[in-house]
Image (cartoon, rainbow, N blue to C red):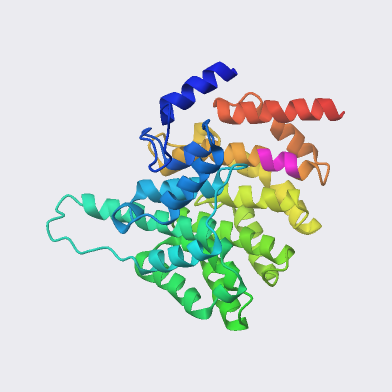
Amino acid sequence: MIQDELDKLTIRIWGEKPDYQTLPKTGLFSHVLLTLPALDRDATNALLYKSLFEAEDAQFFTSEHLSGLIGAATNKPNSLLPNREQAVICFDRLVSWRPLAADDDLLGMKRRKDDALIENIGVALAYSIVPILNTDDITERRFEQLLALLSKLNSFPVVIALPYFAGLYADIAATVEKIIGKGIQARSSNEVRCSASALLQWKELSITGKAPNPPGHLISKMIYLIEAGRIVGLHTLLWCAGEMVKKSWLSQADVAVLADCLPDIFKSTDYCGIRPNSSEAVTASLIRQTAVQLAWDVMQVVSNEKLRAMLEVAKNDALPEVRFTAQEIATKIAKSS
């Protein structure tokens, strides 16, 4: 947009003389204001800090509010995270929340609303709150509070925050190891996704010295599950493996296993062999797209003709997300040759 258009958009959002006391009603999640233009960026961010991290309970404990808080944390490069004091207060508020019983919830609407909120509480803790806690705030009591959210409310995203506590004691590290090891082979794709993300988070923390190394058998188990072609959560496992390949965190043996099994995974998710109304039909294209991307990542480490042939087939895939990914990779290969 040109500057004149940006100025008009700013006035449309904030008005001509904003007082920055309340957020404008845009119909969008609040973190979008980090990207939209503003007359005074510092005042806008200060208002967002207060609105996101110091809201009253009635507003704070809604999926809409927590989605904005999560979006602010993950909105790269314009992320907005709480300060240490706000993080401690938000942690205590979030882990203390429990749903109220409702005898008149015959259609299950309140339960579904609570389930969405429970999911967002876990994500907010994992990506916005726990990463800001300092060493003194990482305690066994807070670890147990996270475990309570996981065991009592099934807030699976909480698992992603557990590696921050792995450096406290060997027993805690063993508990985190057990939870992740069980989760990456669970029957729920959400549980697999969160557990695989937790393993990746643990490895990242260990590289920066904020946690001990995750046990090697967890990564080996992830590679084994990929090789086995187990459909549940497979696209997440492929994505996590890709991140590890790009950062040289996998052994040559693990990379070789990926190189061998990716063509089989791609072939096994061919649309012709999948029933249109099955659960596999929902994730087939996502698995194929992620497998194509991982094939490219693996080819940066080892040369493999089967992977190259797989990419050639993917360039003509029936679905655009797979086809475009393969075509982008083909362009990269052409430029590098």
- Residue at 58% in and 73% down: 165
Where's the C terminus, which quadrant?
top right
Residue 273 relative to residue 51: left or right: right
Residue 16 relative to residue 136: left or right: left
Percent of width and height locating residue 212: 69, 72
- Residue at 55% in and 49% down: 80
- Residue at 68% in and 50% down: 243
Q: Residue furthest right?
A: 337
How many numbered markers are drawn? 0
Q: Is residue 96 magenta?
A: no
Viewer-nearest residue: 272 or 50: 50
- Image quadrant assignment for residue 122: bottom left
Viewer-nearest residue: 203 or 86: 86
Provide the major secondary structure of the magenta segment.
helix
Magenta span = 293-297
Viewer-nearest residue: 120 or 90: 90
Percent of width and height locating residue 90: 44, 63
